[in-house]
Amino acid sequence: GENVEQHPSTLSVQEGDSAVIKCTYSDSASNYFPWYKQELGKRPQLIIDIRSNVGEKKDQRIAVTLNKTAKHFSLHITETQPEDSAVYFCAAPGDQGGKLIFGQGTELSVKP
Amino acid sequence: EAQVTQNPRYLITVTGKKLTVTCSQNMNHEYMSWYRQDPGLGLRQIYYSMNVEVTDKGDVPEGYKVSRKEKRNFPLILESPSPNQTSLYFCASSFTSGSINGELFFGEGSRLTVL
């Protein structure tokens, strides 16, 4: 079945620096890769997603890149701010239509 | 307001006492799913439903049951809870007619403790 590995598990950066979180997946048929942000005590919320027909997608300070050959995708956050502090999850579809497999999560801490 | 509503939000129970966590969405979504969140393990899928009367196992279905008799509701049933089911549970829904390729809308979560 699909396996999604996410690294690092924790990441601490200074305000204004960039942060990069990486995920690898195992099923080469996967074609949709979302990223969710979960603030402390709250529900996960979608922040950006990418489909397999593109290699990069940007939305203001966040971007996602996809390398289908290597089967990995990354979240890039530029000019980090304290409100970016949260747990971030990547995900990829499983081997059945309704499965969505999440990575283990990355706890990002942005220090003022 | 578009939302996914879970109840109860917090529950402490004892081993073996059957319980149900309800989930309801008002967005007319076809797809609904249950996840559990444990430290270091991320979000693990328990069960999902592609539509009414269609349910399937996720990665960690043991000890859980679900039903989808109506489009808006997807209850999670723990017939005989055990301490290893102590966790934070999330219900989620999405508008999809096939494989997952769109946003999942999560409920606020239900924190369950089994003593």
Image (cartoon, coloured by chain):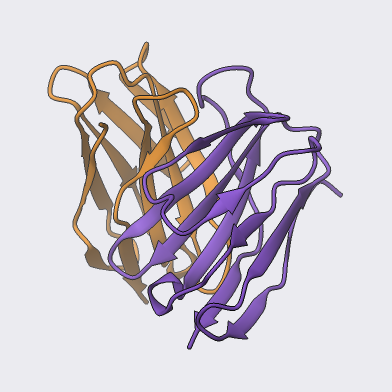
**Residue placed at 46% from the left, 39% from the top?**
B57
**Residue placed at 51% from the left, 27% from the top?**
B100
Residue B90: x percent and y percent?
57, 58
State the residue in front, B58 or A62: B58
Q: Vertically, is B101 above or below A101?
A: above
State the residue in front, A36 or B26: B26
Residue B68: x percent and y percent?
71, 39
Residue A13 visible in the current orientation = yes
Q: For residue A34, what is the image quadrant?
A: top left
**Residue placed at 47% from the left, 23% from the top?**
A97
Q: Vertically, is A7 above or below B58?
A: below
Residue B19: x percent and y percent?
65, 70
Q: Vertically, is A9 above or below B27?
A: below
Label the orange chain with its letter.
A
Looking at the image, the residue that sits furthest to the right is: B1
Q: Vertically, is B110 above or below B26?
A: below
Residue A59 visible in the current orientation = no
Q: For residue A84, what is the image quadrant?
A: bottom left
Tell whether B92 sits left or right of A17: right
**Residue placed at 51% from the left, 44% from the top?**
B47
